[in-house]
Image (cartoon, rainbow, N blue to C red):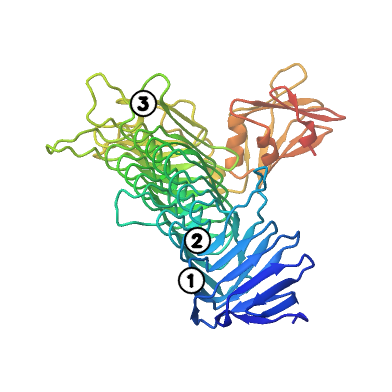
C-alpha cells in the first residue's frame, strides 16, 4: 500500500482532489487536507449521499482516482462527479457505482475546455476496470449527458477501456458524449460492456440526444468503437442517432473496428441507428476489421446505417466485418434516409444483411422520395479485395401505404434507389451508379414493383465478374429475375477445399520470355504459398488485379516466382496494397536480379 494512501468515505462530506504534478494529489474533505496522497480511493459502501466529488488535474501527469461502491444523488445543482483541467485523468471502477446529477450537469462530467485563443486544452478522461469487478450507472441532470458534457457543453475527450457502463442523458443530452443544445461528443470505447441512452421526452416532437455521440441540436460526433468493446445498447432520443450526431446540420465521424460488437443501435425519430441525426447530417461511418454490428435500426425517416432525413452520410464496410441493418420508415437499410441519396461501399470478406424501411427505402442505397436530376445519384460499390469476397443480402422496403388503401409508392430497390411517394407523372427516382466487381455473392430481393439491382424500373447488368460469383435477383414474390452474367462458374473448385495442389494455368496470369513470347509455367499451391515456376533463364510474369484478388481470396499469403537461376517472393497483402482495380503486375526474373512494377511504377522493394 502506498505510504500516503487513504480511503475517503464520500458519506462524510464532499471531496476535492487536485493533482500536485509529482504523482500525488491534494485531497480536501471538510476541514481535513491530505497534501500528498498517491493512491486516491473514494468509497461509499453503497450508501447514498448528496455529497459530490470534484477532480482537478492541471499537470502533465496522469491522475488516477478509484471509485468503490459510490452512490451519489446530487440535490444542489452540481455534477455528482466532475473532472476538469489540462491533464489526463483516469477513473478506476471497483464494485457498483451510481452517479446522478442535478442542474444542467452530466452524471460523470468532463467538459471540453479552451484557452483564450480558442485552442482545446482539456485533458482526456479515461474510465477503466482493471480488476474486472466494476460498474458505473451515470445519469445527467437537465440537458446533461450521462457521461460527458453538461448542458450547452462539448464533452472533453472520453475513453472507456472496461467496466459495465450504463449512461443516460436527460432531455437533449447524449448518453455518452455531448451535452444538450449542440454539445459535441468525442468518444473512444475500446473495452467494456456499454449501454448508452440519449435523453428522452414525453413530447414526440422533442429533440433529444444521441445514445453515443452528439447532444441534441447541432451536436457533432467523433466516435471510435474498437478493441473488444461490446455495445449492448445505444439508443438515440428524438431527432438523434443511436451512435452518431444530434439534430440539424451536424457532422458524424464513426469508426467501428477491431473485434468490437454493437448488439443494438436504435435511432430516434429521424435519426439513423448508426450515422446521421435528423435533418441534414453529414459525415462518414466506417465498419472494418472483424467488427460486428448485430442490429442497427433507423428511426422513422432514417437509415439503419447512414443518413437521417435529408442527410449525406457515406458508409464504408470492409475487412471481415459482419453487419445487419434495417431502415426506419422511408429509410434505406444501409445508405440514405428520407429524400437522401446513399453512398455505400462494401468490400472484402464482409457479410452484410440490409432491409429497406416501409415506404420504399432501398435495402442498400437511397431513401424514399428522392427525385432525380443530373447531380443527384445513389452510389453503391460492392467488390472483393485482398481480404476476400463479400456476401451481401439486401431486401427493398415495402411500398408507402396510401390513405385510400392503394400503395402510394413502389417498393424500394434491394440495391439502388428508393421509391418516389405519390410521384408526378414525369418524375423519376434518383438514378443509381452501382459497381459490382471481383468475386461476390449477392442475394437481392426487390420491394413490390421495384427492381432488385438498379433504379427507375431497370435492372443493371454486370459483366466480367470473377469465377465463383453469384448474383441472385428475385422479385417480391420470390420469382427469379436474374440476368445473364450474374453467375460465373468456379474456375478451380478443388482449390476451395484444398490447401495444396497444382494448377496448369490461371486466367489473368501469363509468363513470357525476353522476346515477349508466352512460355509454359507451373503453379503449385502449398498452404498459403503459391509458387509460379518457369524453366527459363529470364522470364516475365504478368498478372491482372483480378487474378491477384482471386488468389488472395482463396488463401494466398505469399507468392514465389522461380526461374532457372532466380527465386523471389512477395507478400500478398503488401502487393495488393499498391494495386488498384484494373492495374497489372509485371514481375521480371533474370539470373542476377528481380524487378516488380505495378502499372509502370517500380515496387521492387517489396520483393524478398
Q: Quadrant of residue 141?
A: bottom left
Q: Earlier in the sequence, mark 3 or mark 2?
A: 2
**Residue 371 relative to residue 291: left or right:** left
Label 3–label 2 contact, CB within 8 A: no
Label 2–label 1 contact, CB within 8 A: yes
Q: Which residue is mark 1?
A: 74
Q: Which residue is mark 2?
A: 105
**Residue 567 relative to residue 559: left or right:** right
Q: Earlier in the sequence, mark 2 or mark 1?
A: 1
Q: CA distance from mark 3 to mark 2?
A: 45 Å
Residue 118 visible in the displayed image: yes
Q: Earlier in the sequence, mark 3 or mark 1?
A: 1
Query: Which residue is nearer to you in this view: 76 or 518?
Result: 76
Q: Residue at x 76, y 67 (%)?
A: 20
Indicate the position of residue 133 as horizontal and vertical percent values: 57, 75
In this rendering, the count of numbered labels is 3
Indicate the position of residue 605 as horizontal and vertical percent values: 80, 34
Indicate the position of residue 409 as horizontal and vertical percent values: 23, 33
Query: Which residue is nearer to you in this view: 300 or 392?
Result: 300
Q: Residue at x 67, y 36 (%)?
A: 577
Q: Residue furthest front?
A: 31
Q: Residue at x 65, y 81 (%)?
A: 7
SS state under label 1: loop
Query: Which residue is nearer to you in this view: 160 or 24?
Result: 24
Q: Which residue is mark 3?
A: 430
**Residue 596 relative to residue 100: left or right:** right
The N terminus - image quarter: bottom right
Indicate the position of residue 222 as horizontal and vertical percent values: 55, 47
Amino acid at each position: 500500500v502506498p505510504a500516503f494512501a487513504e480511503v475517503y468515505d464520500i458519506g462524510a462530506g464532499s471531496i476535492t482532489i487536485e493533482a500536485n504534478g509529482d504523482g500525488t494529489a491534494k485531497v480536501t474533505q471538510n476541514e481535513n487536507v491530505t497534501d500528498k496522497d498517491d493512491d486516491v480511493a473514494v468509497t461509499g459502501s453503497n450508501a447514498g449521499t448528496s455529497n459530490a466529488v470534484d477532480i482537478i488535474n492541471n499537470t502533465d501527469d496522469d491522475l488516477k482516482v478509484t471509485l468503490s461502491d459510490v452512490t451519489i444523488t446530487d440535490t444542489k445543482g452540481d455534477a455528482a462527479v466532475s473532472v476538469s483541467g489540462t491533464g489526463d485523468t483516469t477513473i478506476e471502477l471497483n464494485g457498483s457505482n451510481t452517479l446522478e446529477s442535478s442542474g444542467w450537469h452530466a452524471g460523470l462530467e468532463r467538459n471540453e475546455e479552451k484557452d483564450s485563443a480558442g485552442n482545446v486544452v482539456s485533458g482526456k478522461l479515461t474510465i477503466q476496470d482493471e480488476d474486472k469487478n466494476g460498474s458505473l450507472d451515470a445519469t445527467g441532470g437537465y440537458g446533461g449527458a450521462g457521461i460527458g458534457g453538461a448542458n450547452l457543453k462539448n464533452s472533453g475527450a472520453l475513453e472507456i477501456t472496461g467496466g459495465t457502463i450504463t449512461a443516460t442523458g436527460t432531455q437533449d443530452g447524449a448518453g455518452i458524449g455531448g451535452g444538450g443544445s449542440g454539445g459535441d461528443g468525442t468518444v473512444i470505447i475500446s473495452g467494456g460492456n456499454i449501454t448508452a441512452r440519449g435523453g428522452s421526452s414525453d413530447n414526440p416532437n422533442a429533440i433529444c440526444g444521441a445514445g453515443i455521440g452528439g447532444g441534441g441540436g447541432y451536436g457533432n460526433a467523433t466516435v471510435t468503437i474498437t478493441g473488444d468493446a461490446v455495445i449492448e445498447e445505444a439508443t438515440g432520443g428524438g431527432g438523434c442517432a443511436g451512435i452518431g450526431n444530434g439534430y440539424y446540420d451536424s457532422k458524424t465521424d464513426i469508426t467501428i473496428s477491431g473485434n468490437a460488437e454493437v448488439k443494438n443501435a436504435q435511432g430516434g425519430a429521424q435519426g439513423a441507428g448508426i450515422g446521421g441525426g435528423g435533418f441534414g447530417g453529414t459525415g462518414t461511418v466506417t465498419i472494418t476489421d472483424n467488427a460486428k454490428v448485430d442490429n442497427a435500426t433507423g428511426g422513422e425517416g432514417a437509415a439503419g446505417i447512414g443518413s437521417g432525413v435529408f442527410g449525406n452520410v457515406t458508409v464504408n464496410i470492409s475487412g471481415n466485418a459482419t453487419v445487419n441493418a434495417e431502415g426506419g420508415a422511408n429509410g434505406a437499410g444501409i445508405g440514405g434516409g428520407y429524400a437522401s441519396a446513399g453512398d455505400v461501399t462494401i468490400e472484402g470478406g464482409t457479410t452484410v444483411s440490409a432491409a429497406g424501411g416501409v415506404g420504399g427505402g432501398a435495402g442498400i442505397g437511397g431513401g424514399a422520395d428522392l427525385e432525380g436530376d443530373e447531380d443527384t445519384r445513389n452510389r453503391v460499390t460492392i467488390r472483393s479485395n485482398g481480404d476476400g469476397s463479400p456476401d451481401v443480402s439486401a431486401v427493398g422496403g415495402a411500398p408507402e401505404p396510401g390513405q385510400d388503401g392503394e400503395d402510394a409508392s413502389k417498393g424500394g430497390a434491394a440495391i439502388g434507389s428508393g421509391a418516389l411517394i405519390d410521384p408526378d407523372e414525369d418524375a423519376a427516382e434518383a438514378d443509381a451508379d452501382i459497381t459490382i466487381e471481383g468475386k461476390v455473392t449477392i442475394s437481392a430481393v426487390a420491394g413490390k414493383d421495384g427492381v432488385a439491382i438498379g433504379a427507375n424500373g431497370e435492372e443493371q447488368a454486370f459483366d466480367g465478374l470473377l469465377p465463383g460469383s453469384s448474383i441472385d435477383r428475385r422479385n417480391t414474390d420470390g420469382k427469379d429475375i436474374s440476368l445473364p452474367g450474374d453467375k460465373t462458374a468456379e474456375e478451380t473448385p478443388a482449390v476451395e477445399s484444398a490447401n495444396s495442389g497444382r494448377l496448369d494455368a490461371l486466367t489473368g496470369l501469363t509468363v513470357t520470355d525476353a522476346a515477349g513470347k508466352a512460355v509454359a509455367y507451373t503453379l503449385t499451391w502449398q498452404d498459403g504459398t503459391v509458387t509460379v515456376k518457369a524453366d527459363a533463364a529470364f522470364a516475365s510474369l504478368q498478372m491482372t488485379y483480378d487474378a491477384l484478388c482471386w488468389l488472395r481470396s482463396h488463401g494466398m499469403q505469399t507468392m514465389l516466382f522461380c526461374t532457372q537461376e532466380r527465386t523471389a517472393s512477395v507478400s500478398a497483402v503488401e502487393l495488393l496494397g499498391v494495386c488498384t482495380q484494373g492495374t497489372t503486375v509485371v514481375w521480371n526474373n533474370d539470373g542476377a536480379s528481380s524487378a516488380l512494377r505495378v502499372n509502370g511504377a517500380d515496387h521492387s522493394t517489396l520483393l524478398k
